[in-house]
């Protein structure tokens, strides 16, 4: 069972500020999802590799060749704020 | 109770991030050129825009495997990428692609020497990941309202290696980093440029009771690019909760065993093996061999000089370690090439000493002129008239004059202090401007003093 504290912790990791009502709603929804996953647990998966991809491909690689980049103006087009050619973000305090 | 200093020991583990020497980034085709204008080397993939797909750079994998084999790590038959989640504006995706439970390689070691004693430092793992962007403060830190981000480095291929906590002193840690860098340079895996951030080091340091095998409270020190930077490092109790999960956009890598073996067979001679060979093949002391093999460029330079004058490898080593390295920085791999003295010219200088054309003393003057002008030593000797005076008649006159001017030395010699002859020899060498053949002068002075 997912507790309120679990939801608060995960929300903090994701930098989400949730209201009390949202926290409770998320707790219920997450528990619903976990309940669904519990059904999968009923299956015997002994000796089955965990699946991280639906397609059985390996070694998809590219040659070490450069390609044209975005121009700085294109790169910064979606920036909420910019300063010269930099993205500007709220001041970061070193940990 | 014994003193505190004997009860505890320092335990140091190092995490080294090395930029792999590729042209393009780890998962996209953006160039990795250092010093480009801010945000001029990004694309939708390294900017983490929705719907894009990363593709692994084959060259980065090859370079990492080469390094793994050189450190004796076991290359895992399969490895996988994972997303490491964290919220910090140095990564536009809010996660970094790294490797977690299934790294590229595990369990190796680096052999090094600290104060002449061999040490084997375990390497726990080696994995691939992407670098993050660079943050700078806008203006003065105290008053700045914003930070500025440049994503040129975001996505640059890195190889992270984690040592076992086998290091005990800062000297050992420095020796590890130095030996590690030398191996990467010999392999061509990383250019090793620490100022440009191509090689970065974090340290995990803890204290524990001596003899204990448990690790004590760990203190992480970030970005020890120079070991003098320690005062900038802060310890922190901040527990990261990265929520790793397999990167769904990248399929696993499977290492072909035959390819791994052919890569192993193609590894170049590594600095440690080369040092041992210099001792056995050229008869050098281990210390000199260590100095000469600290960079591939320097070791190549030495061997080129030996090929040009194979009769005296020891003298060539001495000239490099005591004279040339006083002028050029051994750690700067290109400095030796820029010194203006080619291996063949240095060999030519030693040949002039060995065949009796010039004395060792004059050779130092010639060396200084070679550094300044890049000229051939034989040409300098000829032009400046520095050829050693080995004509017995000319030397005899100089010896007679020196004996006449050194009554005290003569008296001392006759009273049994044979070492007094050295003063006379010195006088002759000085009078000849260093050009007299020292062995001949010595013999003449001995003969004349004995007959007096
Ligand atoms: Zn890119």
Image (cartoon, coloured by chain):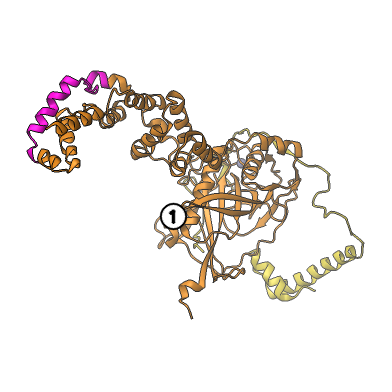
- The quadrant of the picture showing ligand 1 is top right
> Which one of the lettered chains is coloured yellow?
A
Read off the chain for label 1: B
What residue span does the magenta drawing correspond to?
Answer: B381-408
Q: Residue at x 35, y 39 (%)?
A: B322
Q: Nearer the viewer, residue B135 or B73?
A: B73
Answer with the quarter of the image where residue B284 lies. top left
The crowd level at tag 1 (other Cα within 10 Å; few <14, some 14-19, many 20+) is: some
Residue B55 placement (x, y as % from top left): 70, 41
Residue hosting label 1: B138
Marker count (numbered): 1
**Magenta segment includes A26:** no
Left/right placement of residue B204 relative to residue A52 reads left
Is residue B449 visible to the viewer in this orientation of the structure? yes
**Magenta segment includes B382:** yes
Residue B90 placement (x, y as % from top left): 56, 53
Q: Colour of chain B?
A: orange
Residue B374 placement (x, y as % from top left): 33, 25
Q: Nearer the viewer, residue A27 or A46?
A: A46
Q: Nearer the viewer, residue B120 or B192?
A: B120
Residue found at the far bottom of this picture: B1
């Amino acid at each position: 069972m997912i507790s309120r504290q679990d939801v608060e912790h995960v929300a903090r990791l994701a930098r989400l500020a949730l209201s009390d009502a949202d926290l409770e709603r998320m707790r219920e929804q997450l528990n619903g999802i976990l309940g669904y996953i519990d059904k999968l647990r009923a299956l015997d998966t002994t000796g089955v590799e965990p699946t991280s991809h639906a397609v059985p491909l390996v070694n998809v690689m590219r040659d070490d060749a450069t390609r044209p980049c975005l121009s700085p103006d294109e790169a910064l087009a979606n920036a909420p704020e910019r300063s010269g050619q930099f993205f500007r973000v709220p001041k970061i305090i070193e940990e | 109770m014994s003193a505190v200093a004997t009860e505890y020991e320092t335990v140091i583990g190092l995490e080294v991030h090395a930029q792999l020497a590729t042209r393009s980034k780890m998962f996209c085709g953006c160039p990795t050129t250092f010093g480009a204008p801010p945000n001029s080397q990004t694309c939708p993939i390294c900017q983490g825009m929705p719907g894009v797909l990363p593709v692994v750079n084959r060259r980065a994998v090859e370079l990492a495997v080469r390094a793994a084999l050189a450190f004796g790590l076991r290359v895992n038959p399969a490895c996988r990428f994972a997303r490491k989640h964290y919220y910090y504006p140095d990564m536009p995706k809010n996660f970094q692609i790294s490797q977690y439970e299934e790294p590229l390689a595990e369990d190796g070691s680096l052999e090094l020497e600290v104060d002449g004693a061999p040490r084997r430092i375990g390497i726990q793992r080696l994995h691939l990941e992407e670098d993050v962007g660079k943050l700078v403060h806008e203006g003065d830190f105290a008053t700045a309202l914003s930070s500025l981000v440049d994503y040129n480095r975001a996505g640059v291929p890195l190889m992270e290696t984690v040592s076992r906590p086998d290091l005990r002193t800062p000297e050992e840690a420095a020796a590890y980093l130095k030996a590690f860098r030398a191996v990467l340079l010999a392999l061509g895996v990383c250019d090793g440029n620490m100022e440009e951030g191509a090689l970065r080091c974090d340290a995990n340091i803890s204290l524990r009771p001596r003899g204990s095998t448990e690790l004590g409270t760990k203190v992480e020190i970030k970005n020890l690019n120079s070991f003098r930077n320690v005062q900038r490092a802060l310890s922190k109790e901040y527990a990261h909760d990265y929520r790793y999960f397999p990167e769904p956009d990248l399929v696993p890598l499977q290492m072909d065993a035959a390819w791994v073996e052919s890569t192993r067979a193609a590894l170049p001679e590594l600095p440690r093996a080369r040092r041992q060979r210099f001792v056995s093949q050229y008869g050098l002391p281990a210390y000199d061999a260590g100095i000469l093999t600290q960079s591939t460029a320097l070791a190549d330079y030495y061997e080129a000089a030996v090929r040009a004058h194979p009769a005296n490898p020891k003298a060539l080593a001495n000239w490099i370690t005591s004279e040339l390295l006083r002028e050029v920085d051994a750690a700067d791999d290109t400095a030796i090439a820029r010194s203006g003295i080619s291996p063949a010219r240095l060999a030519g200088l030693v040949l002039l000493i060995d065949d009796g054309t010039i004395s060792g003393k004059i050779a130092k003057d010639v060396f200084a002129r070679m550094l300044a002008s890049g000229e051939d030593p034989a040409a300098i000797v000829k032009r400046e008239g520095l050829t050693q005076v080995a004509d017995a008649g000319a030397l005899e006159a100089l010896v007679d004059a020196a004996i006449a001017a050194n009554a005290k030395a003569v008296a001392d010699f006759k009273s049994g202090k044979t070492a007094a002859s050295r003063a006379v020899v010195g006088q002759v060498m000085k009078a000849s401007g260093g050009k007299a053949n020292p062995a001949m002068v010595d013999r003449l002075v001995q003969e004349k003093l004995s007959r007096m």
